[in-house]
Amino acid sequence: MRNIQTREGFEFWDKLNALPRYAFLLSPSGNSVQKFEDQAMGNWIDVHEAQKVVDQAQDDINQFRSERDALQQRLTAADEQIDRLSPRHTEQPEGKRERFEKWVMATKHPVYGFLDGRSLARGDDRTGYADEYVQGLWVAYLAFGAEQPAPVAVVLPERKSVNTHNSHDWDEGHTDGWNAYDAELKRLNPSL
């Protein structure tokens, strides 16, 4: 973080700007060049002095990088330990993955409709999916343990019969519609 008042974050910039600046003049005879210190108009600094400042900055950068790398290793080790201790890893992941893939292929997804097998291509790390939509479904599936719910008994009303004694066109249309719905439901779900 840089702070203009305290000059925090400007240390190396200030060191470079504090180096003496030089200007060069060609002698009137044109045979020589004179170097003189000129902070106001000089655009030249001594390369060796500038290199010292840059070396200090690079040393600090290297130290920060090694500290970052050590922290990343600790974080990775902690993540791996959490994964090993997590109860969701006690199941066989192959069985869960197979159930997930069957569900993905059998489900009509909003916007996308039915997906084809290409959507199940694995990503670069081989644990996820290359398709972002399917990867999002997989992460949610793992996080929330989206197992199939246990089957429940469904009780549906009986088929309607037409009341021929006091029938109206509306009653007959309603009965025909209900019976068509009931037939289609049973065709799609033979166990009902």
Image: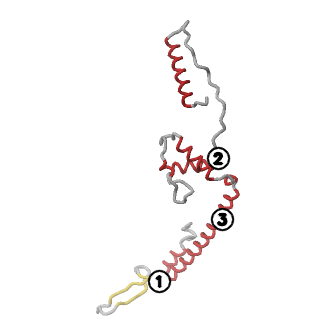
Q: Decide: is 47 above or below 189.
A: below
Q: Is residue 170 left or right of residue 34?
A: right
As rendered, which of 59 and 88 lies closer to the eye?
88
How far is the residue under mark 3 from the one under mark 2?
Answer: 25 Å
Dot 1 amino acid type: Pro
Dot 2 amino acid type: Gly
How far is the residue under mark 1 from the one under mark 2?
Answer: 67 Å
Dot 3 amino acid type: Ala
- The quadrant of the image that shows the N terminus is bottom right
Residue named by callout 1: 20
Q: Which mark lies nearer to you, 1 or 3?
A: 3
Numbered mark located on residue 77 in the image: 3
Numbered mark located on residue 145 in the image: 2
Mark 3 Cα shell of 10 Å, populated few (<14), some (14-19), many (≥20): few
Mark 2 Cα shell of 10 Å, populated few (<14), some (14-19), many (≥20): few
As rendered, which of 18 and 89 lies closer to the eye?
89
- Residue 125 position, x and y percent, is 54, 60
Q: Decide: is 162 above or below 30.
A: above
Q: Which mark lies nearer to you, 3 or 2?
A: 2
